[in-house]
Image: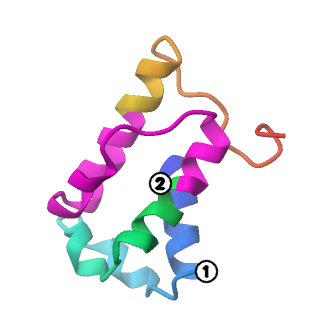
């Protein structure tokens, strides 16, 4: 679900081509996101999980897959090892 939320945000809000995400080694930097874009993308996740992700400035140096794994790890650490339902309905 986390991957789909971020992909949907980038495709629907930032106009990124969905085919970009077919590359398993896709660097986050190749998405052409500026710092404001990164913050807005992370707000999408933070709003759903109820806490601020630590040090988002490291993500542009990662691959997209590594960024997803890092975000999932932070969410699990905040939720006693669980990955909560991140759907919009669950965050209300």
In the rendering, at what x and y percent does residue 76 appear? 45, 24
In magenta, the rendered stretch is 43-72
Q: Is residue 52 magenta?
A: yes
Secondary structure, mark 1, is: helix
Q: Is residue 58 above or below residue 91?
A: below
Quarter of the view holding residue 71: top left
Left or right placement of residue 47 versus residue 66 in this view:
right
Mark 1 = which residue? 12
> In front: mark 1 or mark 2?
1
- Crowding near the residue tagged with mark 2, few <14, some 14–19, many ≥20 C-alpha atoms within 10 Å: some
Left or right placement of residue 66 versus residue 17 in this view:
left
Helix, strand or loop for the magenta stretch, by majority: helix
Between the C-alphas of marks 1 and 2, the distance is 14 Å
Secondary structure, mark 2, is: helix
Mark 2 = which residue? 3
Left or right placement of residue 39 versus residue 50 in this view:
left
- The foreground one among 48 and 1 is 48
Give me the residue at 57% from left, 69% from top: 9
Marks 1 and 2 close (CB-CB < 8 Å): no
In the rendering, at what x and y percent does residue 83 appear? 53, 27
In the rendering, at what x and y percent does residue 38 appear? 40, 65
Give me the residue at 48% from left, 55% from top: 42
Give me the residue at 22% from left, 64% from top: 60
């Amino acid at each position: 679900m986390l991957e789909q939320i971020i992909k949907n945000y980038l495709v629907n809000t930032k106009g990124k081509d969905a085919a970009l995400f077919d590359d398993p080694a896709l660097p986050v930097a190749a998405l052409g996101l500026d710092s404001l874009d990164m913050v807005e993308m992370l707000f999408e996740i933070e709003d759903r999980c109820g806490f601020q992700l630590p040090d988002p400035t490291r993500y542009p140096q990662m691959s997209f897959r590594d960024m997803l794994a890092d975000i999932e790890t932070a969410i699990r650490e905040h939720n006693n090892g669980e990955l909560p339902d991140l759907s919009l309905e669950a965050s209300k």
